[in-house]
Image (tube, rainbow, N blue to C red):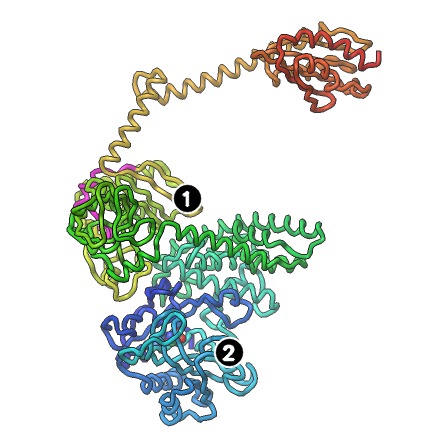
Amino acid sequence: MDGDTIRRTFLEFFEQRGHRVVPSSSLIPTAPGLLLTNAGMNQFVPYLLGTERPPYLRAATAQKVFRTPDIDLVGHDARHLTFFEMLGNFSFGDYFKEDAIRYAHELVTKELGIDHDRLWVTVFESDADAEAIWLDGVGLPPDRLVRRGKFDSDGESLNFWWMHAAGPCGPCSEIYVDRGPAYGPDGGPDVDEERFLEIWNLVFMQDECDEHAEVVRELPRKNIDTGSSLERVAVVLQDVASAFDTDLLRPLVASAEELTERVYGRQERDDVSLRIIAEHARATTFLIADGVLPSNEGRGYVLRRMLRRLVTHARRLGVAVDVMPSLVATVIERFHGAYPELAANQAFIHQVATSEEEGFARTYRQGMGVFEEEVAKAKASGSKRLSGEAAFRLHDTFGFQEQLTLELAREQGLEVDADGFARLMQEQRERARRARKRGEGAGDLGEVAAEGGPTEFLGYERLDADAHIVGLLRDGAREDSAGEGDRVLLALDRTPFYAEGGGQVGDAGTIRTATGLVQVTDTRLGPGGTIVHEGVVTAGEVRAGDEAGASVDPARREATTRSHTATHVLHHTLRQTLGEHARQAGSLVAPGRVRFDFTHYESVPRDALEEIEAIANRRLADDQPVRAYETTLEFARSQGAMALFGEKYGDLVRVVEIGDYSIELCGGTHVHRTGEVALLRVASESSIGSGFRRIEALTGPDALAHVNVERRLLEEVTEALGAGDPQTAPERARQALARIKQLESELGAIRRTARTQEVERFAASAQDVAGVRLAVARMPGGADELREVATALRKRLEPEGAVVLGAAADGKALLVAACTAALVARGVTAPNLIAEAAATVGGKGGGRTPDLAFAGGSRADALDAALAGIPARLLGLLGG
Ligand code: SER
């Protein structure tokens, strides 16, 4: 049975038994406390906890899941995966243990055809119910049932399942399949978990625990959450050694084989790399498809690490070309049927993966250079280890993970100072933590949030509102009151102020109480949905608990709102003009100003940019209505709404629709009709890293102001060029530049002629000093000119000759001396020749080479005297 058939069989089995088949949620989790979605039940947490009413009581999913603790193990054996597909069925207070066990047994033995005699089962040690159902209900022989505790000696969960974050949890029962003696010794899962492979975990979710797995309460209703790894079921049904040999991962291994020209299964060292390439290619493709972008923190960092690990292994197997394009293509080809988001985001995935690979390939090369230097240094000093500083620098500047540096060092017979490295990493974390903490007052804001709950936001409809101050912070600490001049953070029970989010800047304005006034300079989101107003008390005193009138600065908000609508229009126009791959990667929506980052692989030519500007402005002038409404995610998706990252099935989302052409999920503020924006003016287009571009634009009156500034500039340029009309200014400028160039070349020719004549003249006037031809002269010019003449002259004075030239400028004296090779051979060097003269002009000889020397001094008036002494000096040097 191939992977697709197993997935379909599972879902259909439960659909026939009253389960709603729900699509996989995003890898960006909806449950709090998680970095990435780690189980099928994540999207159902509120239903399991009973905080939300489930729309159905039974569900089944094939869920994309990701488990980060295993990243470094992947590849070193054939067992660990970071990304896998988890098949699961769920009951929200409907059926419990009995049905869950019976369904699982029926599906495994009847539909999947795995022999009952090959099954082993574990149960939680005190779960007599589960035990009885397995033994008496489905007839499992007692010697194939294993009782286990909550945790093993390493603290790993055994027959107790939790999210590894606060949330629902409970005892569980696992199903194992005996793969036969070829895979290991007999004796059940306690003896060998390779031969006895776990294929399904049934969790009886009856409790809630905290982030340390301590049970804090019993759940109001008893739920079922099961999870079965599709890859493992495929291993059993296809009777292969590991997931890498199933039809799910084998195509990726094949891609890796082709790229690296290695064969899987020949050499363990190659196999490790092939597995890493295959597994990470699949995982990273799915991450990007869900909107994770490479970065230096959180899930973006997980993605970056994996891409780098993959690329490193490809490089080490000698691949010199980019590997991501063909790997991503294979993943999409293999999985787009079950996960349409892969095909839908194809261009985007390619672009993100490829630019990250290109960027890293560059740093990798530089990093390898640094690594080799460090190795050479260590070896030269007789050390057997690479310093912690070196490892840290490789990590910090070149993105070399510790593991990579370790492996590379080992190949060179070196170890790495791991303690030193760890210390530097710790220091860096401390620095980052302190930087985060500064000025945040996070703890006290959390307290305000806990007391007051989320702030009610009124700002879509109005700009003024009466409210109460529910929290006041001064210098990051909670206070009862604040006086004139104090910087404060204020939380109100309700507010018209928009908190910075979705790229849109926070509102500014005033908060006025009976006794005082606060100028709000910015607004942002605090913990627990509080809206935090930042500002300064400019008059009187304000107190916690006071009634307050909150007023948003209307002009600033209006200008920001225009920008936000303009951003959506621009986004739509970019996709229409450049292609679907041109997706938003970030934005700043500010009063009258927009910065829009998007994915695109080359610069946008001026013509295209003008066309984009023209189309966007035509759209604005069409004056279509802008509608904002709340709806379910499914509806929004069915309408083709963009930016569906991180949203969850069943969630209410806010949709902003412009005319019939643009639809986006967005929490920002917008104009009512596009005509209100009036004008969008693109100011610049530039690169912000490979694969990402940035457009800066101005909107509304600010766009007009920008045009005026440009017009004034052009007028000034026209005037400066003496062109009566701006139309002729470019031609004038070109002509002027051409003329300058021509004059420069003419001047150069004149100078060269003059110099030749000068050289001739000086040569003719050379005197004879004991058989050596010596030219001494004054000339105008700087060091370069003097050197040029001196070296030309020297040639004319061969074989034994010397030149000393002097120049005076701005009261300073400059001397240059040159000697022919034959003279130098006789022991007379240029620095020596001018040493005395240099002293005479009050400076020092600056010898550079024996045949050419410079000197400078502050006494131009002594230049003649200095030059006059040269013949005697030469004679002296010649020993005469
Ligand atoms: N939540 C359990 C697991 O992930 C069963 O689905 O293993």
In what element is the residue under mark 1? loop
Residue 408 on image: x %, y %: 61, 57
Residue nearer the viewer, 280 or 779: 779
Residue nearer the viewer, 849 or 436: 436
Which tag, 1 or 2, sits closer to the chain's start? 2
In what element is the residue under mark 2? loop
Q: Which mark is residue 198?
A: none
What residue is drawn where x is 27% and y is 73%? 47
Q: How many marks?
A: 2
Residue extent of the magenta highlight: 660-681
What residue is drawn where x is 58% and y is 56%? 420
Residue 469 visible in the shown view: yes
The residue that mark 2 highlights is 153
The amino acid sitting under disc 2 is: Ser
Above-or-below relation of 333 to 503: below
The quarter holding residue 353 reads: bottom left
Above-or-below relation of 109 to 674: below
| Circles 1 and 2: CB atoms closer than 8 Å | no
